[in-house]
Image (tube, rainbow, N blue to C red):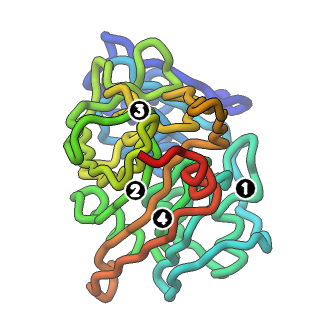
């Protein structure tokens, strides 16, 4: 197999329902065991997610095989400030700042959350693969808020199972465009890879996965609303995609909303990033079984934007 570059393959109709390891083996001319090693080591991503070797590929899946030349050879600990809400020998809970990438990748090998955590905690779980050790969920670069990272392999698998079985309490705060109807509601729309732009997620997709977001209005501003949102599922960009789909994109979201500046009462208000904050995260400790819940206050940049909006 050529290993001098990353390879991206889009699944066609003729390839659907193949196991991922068989698909990789056939497309790259390697044995199934070699394909399985690539998958297990985290070198194969399906729609930007690491799947098991038994995953059944679907039409329009975007499969990327990462070259070892592009692999992060080792995460370098860096003395980057990070707000740690809880730490024990098994896991660490942080309040991730907006603008921070969670794990190293090509283009941003350092100054990530994992670089910081390795410095502060001295270890990370091995599970999760060489590209994102200990990471059981993530927040987008421009989303702030509470995250948990495993420092121990047993903790990793225990946390991953809770996320998979939807036993994690996740509450977000978002500032959305427009005056949404009703004080609360539920958005039930499948989320999958966009047909027109493979770099984006969409509710208009051929092979989406179930996605459910419940929401409630916290405060109205006429041109915008501050809402609380809870994830019943955890699809990529779920909240951003769901609110965009119902006509109320997140303010500052350059991918799904493009409402980065609004004008009200003759005043222009700029939103420097997507107005999304992971406020609360609750889960059972994967080793002790104790229920833990952590919260992080709305960050100053979102507060500042709120302060500029007109009272209703």
Q: Is residue 236 visible?
A: no
Tell me which label, 2 or 3, sits earlier in the chain.
2
Q: State whether residue 140 is above or below residue 256.
A: below
State whether residue 206 is above or below residue 200.
above
Q: Earlier in the sequence, mark 2 or mark 4?
A: 4
Q: Give residue 172's mark.
A: 2
Residue 154 disc label: none
- Discs 2/4, front: 2
For marks 3 and 1, the one nearer the N-term is: 1
Are the residues at dot 4 and dot 1 in contact (C-beta closer than 8 Å)?
A: no
The residue where tag 3 is placed is 178
Classify 10 Å Cα crowding around label 3: few (below 14), some (14-19), many (20 and above).
some
Residue pointed to by mark 4: 127
Q: Look at discs 2 and 1 and give the one toward the viewer.
A: 2
Of the numbered discs 4 and 1, the one sitting upstream in the chain is 1
Residue 139, relative to residue 62: is it above or below? below
């Amino acid at each position: 197999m050529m290993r001098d570059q990353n390879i991206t393959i889009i699944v066609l109709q003729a390839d659907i329902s193949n196991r991922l390891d068989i698909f990789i083996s056939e497309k790259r001319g390697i044995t199934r065991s070699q394909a399985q090693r690539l998958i297990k080591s985290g070198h194969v991503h399906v729609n930007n997610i690491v799947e098991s070797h038994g995953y059944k590929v679907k039409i329009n899946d975007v499969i990327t095989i990462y070259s070892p030349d592009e692999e992060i050879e080792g995460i370098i600990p860096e003395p980057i400030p990070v707000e740690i809400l809880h730490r024990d020998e098994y896991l660490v809970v942080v309040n991730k700042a907006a603008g921070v990438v969670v794990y190293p990748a090509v283009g941003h090998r350092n100054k990530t959350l994992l670089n910081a955590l390795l410095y502060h905690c001295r270890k990370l779980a091995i599970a999760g693969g060489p590209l994102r050790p200990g990471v059981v969920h993530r927040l987008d670069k421009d989303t702030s808020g509470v995250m948990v990272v495993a420092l121990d392999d047993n903790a990793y698998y225990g946390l991953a199972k809770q996320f998979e079985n939807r036993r994690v309490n996740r509450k977000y705060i978002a500032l959305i465009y427009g005056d949404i109807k009703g004080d609360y509601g539920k958005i039930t729309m499948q989320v999958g890879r966009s047909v027109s732009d493979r770099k984006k997620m969409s509710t208009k997709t051929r092979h989406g996965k179930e996605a459910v977001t419940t929401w409630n209005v916290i405060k109205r501003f006429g041109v915008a609303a501050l809402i609380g949102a809870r994830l019943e599922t955890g699809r990529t960009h779920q909240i951003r995609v769901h609110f965009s789909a119902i006509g109320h994109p997140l303010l500052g979201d350059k991918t799904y909303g493009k409402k980065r500046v609004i004008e009200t009462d003759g005043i222009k208000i700029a939103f420097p990033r997507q107005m999304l904050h992971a406020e609360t995260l609750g889960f059972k400790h994967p080793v002790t079984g104790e229920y833990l819940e952590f919260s992080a206050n709305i960050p100053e940049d979102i507060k500042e934007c709120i302060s500029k909006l007109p009272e209703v």
